Each structure stands twice: as structure tokens, then as C-alpha cells.
Amino acid sequence: MPQDLFQAPDYYFLDDLLSEEHKLVRDATREWVKREVSPIIEEAAQKAEFPKQMIPGLAEIGAFGPFIPEEYGGAGLDYMSYGIMMQEIERGDSGIRSTASVQTSLVMYPIYQFGTEEQRKKYLPKLASGEWMGCFGLTEPNHGSNPGGMESRFKDMGDHYLLNGAKMWISNSPFADIAVVWAKDMDDNNRIKGLIVHKDMEGYSAPETHNKWSLRASATGELIFDNVKVPKENLLPNKTGLGAPLMCLDSARYGIAWGALGAAMDCYDTALRYAKERMQFDRPIASFQLQQKKLAEMITEITKAQFLTWRLGQLRNEGRATSAHISMAKRNNVDMALKIAREARQVLGAMGITGDYPIMRHMMNLESVVTYEGTHDIHLLITGFDITGIPAFK
């Protein structure tokens, strides 16, 4: 069983800028990852199995809805704490962080923000405790970067809605108890609205997606709705239109910006330790110029990303973080993490591709993270639109 020797890089003493509460949250999450995730994650990834035994632990450390108020079962923490938790969890594995991100930002967040008080009381405590798990149905087979073109629709049948359509690349869907599904209302000019759909509703199915080379320790699947009868009280009434699911994606992308930083930190720490221990030509390879170049560039990029993300956390807490701010951090940090994973793999040579070290697993995971919740290119165009005022896409 591999021993987790991770030591977090903090070259510019970012710890000095964190509150004691933030440090407590980080340390508790880090200890849980070392104890529960690190010992089993390589085997889970090799077997392409989601370790469902993680769910109670994630709930116990408050990773499900940490910023949701305590009256609804959340931890009542700030957004900086949420980000720090995602950093530590993704340091363990992107797939485990995805499970927490989906539950928090894509299921609990829309129910809290757009739902009724009855919906909040019914769903949020059970989601926070992990008794119920959820997923988020937006992406479709024919509509990824253009979610507004979705084909899923529902119709008012008097005493219920009738939902038809399909979603794909849905994290958590194979084991989710509920799905927050976005579809067009045929009786309201095809306005996009959110529905809470239960897995036991007739016509609902969630086949698992297999043969993935990435996020292998995460459960991914489809959502298929074949004349599903959805009770009218399951409609999320407080916000409609494409802006509603995009607000959810902002919250998820914020968590990803922090999470990717954790993956980069793990790759750097692994490479640094290996370079000091690996002997060639009677010297540790850390003594050679090209290895020092790799390591120095890694810590430089990590340090820059740490401060970008920390500032984003401040802005999010103040309610001033825009979608464009979040896009920039998500794009920068995932790209940075991917480059560091590739460089770190080279430091380890052939050993870098084995499951004895986490680097190749992080690298494969990040190939999904760079695409989901908005692709690398789309986030670039969001920044371009924000600074020019001219949209490069519809």
C-alpha cells in the first residue's frame, strides 16, 4: 500500500493570507485524503471503479455543500473554504473531486438558489449527508459547447410534466438518486428550465459509460428520459433560461480552478522527491541543470496559480467574481496542471507511467478536466468577449 508523503508547496507563504478556519478546513481535508483516498485510489483507477465507500467520508468532512447554510444540512462555510477543500480532494484524485463538485455546485446549489423552500428542506439535508447522491443533466449527444441547442423537452400534461430527451457525459449518473435536469418547456416558448428527476421514475435510465482512459475512478454515464412523468412540484421555479445552468457551471468551474491546482501540486511534490532520491552518474538527478529547470518552472507556475485562485476566492466571497473571472482561472489552472503533469512524468522517466506514482493518473484525469465544464478554447473566447465586448461565438 503506497504511503502518502505529500508536502504542499507554498513558495510565497500563501498560508499567511489564510484564516485559521481556512487552515483547519484544509488540514482536515488533507488528512482525510491521506488516510482514505491515497491508499486505494491507484487500484480503483486501474479497475475503473468508483470507490463508493468514499461517500460517507466526503459527507463527514463537509465536502457536500460546504457553502450551503447549516439549516439545510450544509457546513455554512465561505467560498474560500469550498475551494480549498476541492484543492485537497483533487490532490487525491480528480474523479473524487468531481463527485463532490457535482453534488455541491450542480445539484445542491441549483436547489438552494432556484428551488422552493419545500424543495430545499426535502433534498438538501439528504444530499449533504450523502444519503442521496445527485447528478446534473445539461450536456447532450449533439450539444456540448452549445447547451442552448439542447433537444430535451417537457410538456405540461395537466397534473404532471412529461419529459423526453437524453444527456451524456454525466458524472455520478450511474448511482445518482436524483438528477437536476435542464430541458425546454414546450408550453413556454421552449424556455430552458430545471427539473428534479428521481431515478425510480418510470422511463428514467442511466447507463454507465465504459472504456474511459480518464477519470477512471469516477462513475460517468448517460441520462435517458422516455416519457418520464415528473411531478409539477419538482420544477425549479426561481430562475429560468440558459443563465440558470450557467450559474451552476460558474460554481463548478470555481471548484475546478482550485482542484486542478491540487493535482499540479501533487505532481510537483512527487517529482521533487523523486529527483532528490534518484541517483544517476553517482549524483541525484536533482543536481542536473535540466531537472532543476523543470522543477523551478513547475513551482513558479504553481505559485502564480495559487495567487490567482486565492484572489478569485476573495472575489467570490465578496460576490464580485464574474463568469469571466472564473473562466480565466479554470482555463489557466487546468492548462498549468496538465503541463506540470507532463513535465513531472519526464522527471520520473519510465517510472512515471506506472501506478506506483500518481502522475500518469493525474495526467489522464486532467485531459477530461481541460474539456468539461467548458473547453479550453471556449474559456479563452469567454475572456476575449469580456475584454473586447465582441462575441466570437453565438
Image (tube, rainbow, N blue to C red):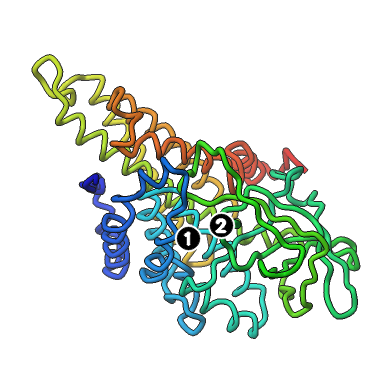
Near mark 1 (Cα within 10 A), the count class, few <14, some 14-19 or many ≥20, is many
**Which disc is residue 201 wearing?**
none
Res. 306 visible in picture? no
Residue 161 x, y percent position in the rendering:
83, 72
Mark found first going from the N terminus, 2 or 1: 1
The spot of residue 165 in percent (x, y) is 79, 55
* Left or right, 160 with reference to 308: right
Residue nearest the observer in this picture, 392 or 106: 106
Q: Is residue 92 visible?
A: yes
Q: Nearer the viewer, mark 2 or mark 1?
A: 2
What's the amino acid at mark 2?
A: Asn
Residue 167 placement, left or right of 70: right
Q: Quadrant of residue 138?
A: bottom right
Residue 270 appears left or right of 96:
left
Residue at position x 66%, y 56% from top? Answer: 206
Dot 1: element: helix
Q: Furthest residue to the left?
A: 282
The residue labelled by disc 1 is 100
Q: Secondary structure at mark 2?
A: loop
Amino acid type at image mark 1: Ala
The residues bearing labels 2 and 1 have C-alpha atoms spaced at a distance of 10 Å
For image coordinates 41% across by 72% down, the residue present is 77
The percent position of residue 102, horizontal first and vertical second, equals: 54, 59
Q: Quadrant of the C terminus?
A: top right
Query: Residue at 15% of width from left, 31% of height from top?
Result: 276
Q: Could you say which quadrant of the image residue 297 lies in? A: top left
Say which residue label 2 marks: 172
* Residue in the foreground of this view, choosing between 286 and 162: 162
Q: Is residue 48 above or below residue 171?
A: above
